[in-house]
Amino acid sequence: MRKLKFTILLVLLGNCVFAEKVATFYDLFRPKAIKVDKTQIYITEEASVFIYSREDFGLKKKFGKKGQGPREFLEWSMREGITVSIQSNYIIVGSRGKVSFFSLDGNYIRDIKSRFGRKIKPFEKRFVGSERYYGKDQTLLDIICIYDAEFKKSTEIYKTGSYIQLRRRNGFLFFSKSFDYYPCEDKIFVIAENNFLIDVFDRNGKKIYSIKSEYERLKVTETHKEDALNYFKTDYLSRDRYEWYKKNIRFPEYFPAIRSLNIANKKIYTRTYKKVDGKTECFIFNTKGKLLRKVFLPIQEKDCRDSYPFTINNGKLYQLIENPDTENYELHVTKIEE
């Protein structure tokens, strides 16, 4: 492994610190996700997890490789990779066929065999996760479920049609409706609609209220469609199947209202597709659904389909961005005006 180097740039603004580029990581090539806590930064890349110090950005540990044994992971797909969830005293890694537990130092604890590791998130002493299977009419469904401590399914709380429907010959829906969920305290927050709607469920999986908001509908233009087709033509993961995508891709008339959902420090951050001066619109709510503020965040896009990996924690946006000149990944931090 090449030696990790880093650079630090801090800009002082009044009595607070507003950071843009705070570090450069020379060992990352195609990172998929980033998480942070009070002392560490966690980054996933293929079947590996990197742990960096937030004090000096040095690499503390790297663990995981492709395989099926302890400390080994199989990616859900080359695009999805593996997932991590950071708790107060352990790390959960979700991969194909199992869920793995590690200490915050990256030491192995145990595996639980499960096919439900995609987007697994702790919920009280249980877990929330998703499944995907075909219904009776051959519709491919995305399902949100509550699982017990050993990942046995207890309750299905949400069901919706997937963005890809091969058996029904409906093809592949680009700019599809959002499908995401976050547990917070004793509730589960779910987005899976085209409209600006977040459904909230209690600890037993019963819907208790919804969060709604007015928003500006954005039309999917011919330029957007051309950009999407060019993405499949040039993306290294998709270009071999370009003709299939060209034949089967479908587009909605309008973009979904909510692009992604993040919950941190009892605040809900909902990102839309609207952009102003290169910044992305974000609605901030409290967990009861009160709109606190609307802000525009400098979330940079990797391509027309995905943003560069980012997360929100303690009122700050953390994003890994590739420098096109050096081809190295840099960590950018932005204080969110809340």
Image (cartoon, rainbow, N blue to C red):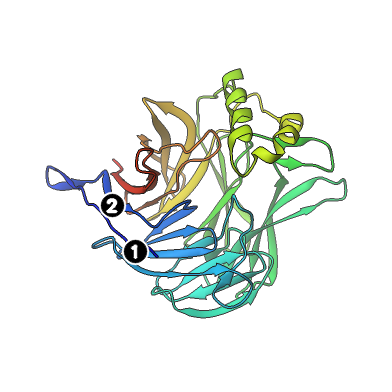
The image quadrant where one finds the C terminus is top left
Q: Is residue 7 above or below residue 11?
A: below
Q: Which residue is disc 2 drawn over?
A: 23
Query: Mark 2: few, some, or many residues within 10 Å (few <14, many ≥20)?
Result: many
| Label 2: element kind | strand
Please provide percent x and percent y for residue 264.
40, 54
Q: Residue at x 34, y 48 (%)?
A: 330
Query: Is any atom of residue 186 visible in this view?
Result: no
Q: Which residue is disc 1 drawn over?
A: 52
Horizontally, is 70 left or right of 284 in the view?
Answer: right
Query: Is any atom of residue 183 visible in this view?
Result: yes
Q: Disc 1 or 2, which lies upstream in sequence?
A: 2
Q: Is residue 59 above or below residue 34?
A: below
- Residue placed farthest to the bottom in the image? 109
Query: Mark 1: few, some, or many residues within 10 Å (few <14, many ≥20)?
Result: many
- Residue placed farthest to the front in the image? 2
Q: Which is nearer the eye, 332 or 335?
A: 332
Q: Amino acid at mark 1?
A: Tyr
| Label 1: element kind | strand
The image quadrant where one finds the N terminus is bottom left
Please provide percent x and percent y for residue 320.
39, 48
Say if mark 1 contacts mark 2, CB within 8 Å. Answer: yes
- Among the 4 quarters of the image, the one containing residue 172: top right
- Residue placed farthest to the top in the image? 222
Please provide percent x and percent y for residue 337.
28, 40
Horizontally, is 53 left or right of 112 in the view?
Answer: left
Q: Which is nearer the eye, 203 or 220?
A: 220
Q: Amino acid at mark 2?
A: Ala
Q: CA distance from mark 1 to mark 2?
A: 11 Å
Please provide percent x and percent y for residue 105.
38, 75
Q: Residue at x 65, y 34 (%)?
A: 174
Horizontally, is 189 left or right of 176 in the view?
Answer: left
